[in-house]
Amino acid sequence: MTADIDFPRLSVLVIDDDPSVRSVTSTMLRRMTIPNIAVAESGDRGLELFRSAAPPFDLIICDWDMPGMNGMELYEQVRADHPKLPFLMLTGRNDLDSVITARSSGVAGYLVKPFSSEQLKEKISFVMAM
Amino acid sequence: MPLPGIITLATPNEGRARSGLAGSLALHWRQHQETPALIDVDDDPTTPQSTGPLASLMVKADPAESIGALARRVGKRRRPVIIDTRGEPNRATIEALAASDLALVALEPTASNVKFALQTWHLVREINATRERAIRPIAIRFVLLSTPAALAITYQIRQELKAAGFKVLDTEIAHLSQHGGDSARPTSLPRGSSAQSDIANVVQELEKLDFGDLPGAPAK
């Protein structure tokens, strides 16, 4: 009972300071037939891409712990203008406090690294359907 | 099987489950010589204690203490602790779920209620993936509230949920008592009523779940 998401029409912004995570995530997204994928190596660059995107991104997939602006700070900035935009937090934090903090702030989905392509797809389907 | 120590009841913001189910469960367990406690996450801590049938079961939240810490503290003396939550998960609801042995999600056969149930299921799964809960994951069960007019759609939704791997109680709640703050109301579920029978069936299913050796079980 998962929503049918039209993956070939999605445009996704991936933000992570780790080049290998950016690469693996982008590859997984392409295999899901998502054609429009942009990547950023920092929160600041991600916010810049997000604000200049036309048409806007449908989904942001973002790391939490990055030098400079972290994922939660980025989320707060994005939410101020786009409160309904699906935001998926990818993180190495697998502790209860972090899940409570992210989800109670409004982050739509939380996925702990490392993750499989199936886990990422299921999580995207969920956050896009909400 | 031991009773679950802490149960979070998650109900959508609208509908029949919004009030009544948590109180009915608490009253049932009290009638069966358990020591339930009821915490309402939306309760205003500054309002006076209710005088209704649930008054002796209610535990007031303390703004200085998280709902999870409160439930664990109360759970050392009483069992089960039922945390009543409603609507989109806020911090208190998520803390309640994180402290729970069981998340019971009540839903009516509507699209918005199913969406709510799936949201809660995903949230519980994320909590269960944490290192703190991975060794003792929260059990989650859906319970359907039905009406004679909605039997067909309730059946269909049950089948779809089960086919997708979600765990749904066999009992459908068709009758639910309301427990307001009116002290003139009875202090227990009316014996032999349909509402009592539905709740008893729900409890019977919950008591079959294996919660293992829960820490801090109160002596009976």
Image (spheres, coloured by chain):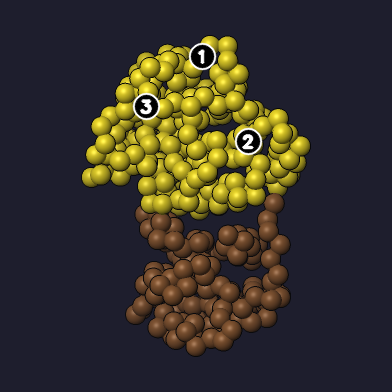
Q: Position of residue B117 (x, y in %)?
A: 58, 46
Q: Which residue is mark 3?
A: B181
Q: Is residue B114 above or below residue A117?
A: above
Q: What is the three-letter code of the residue carrying label 1?
A: Pro
Q: Is residue A105 above or below residue A17?
A: above
Q: Are marks 2 and 3 in contact (CB under 8 Å)?
A: no
Q: Image quarter for residue B174?
A: top right
Q: Colour of chain B?
A: yellow
Q: Position of residue B166 (x, y in %)?
A: 65, 43
**Left or right: A65, with A24 as reference point:** left
Q: Nearer the viewer, mark 2 or mark 1?
A: 1
Chain containing mark 3: B
Badge 3 marks a residue whose secondary structure is loop
Identify which residue is drawn at 41% across, 52% down. B90
The residues tagged by marks 2 and 1 sit, at their Cα atoms, a distance apart of 22 Å
- Please give the letter of the chain rendered in brown: A
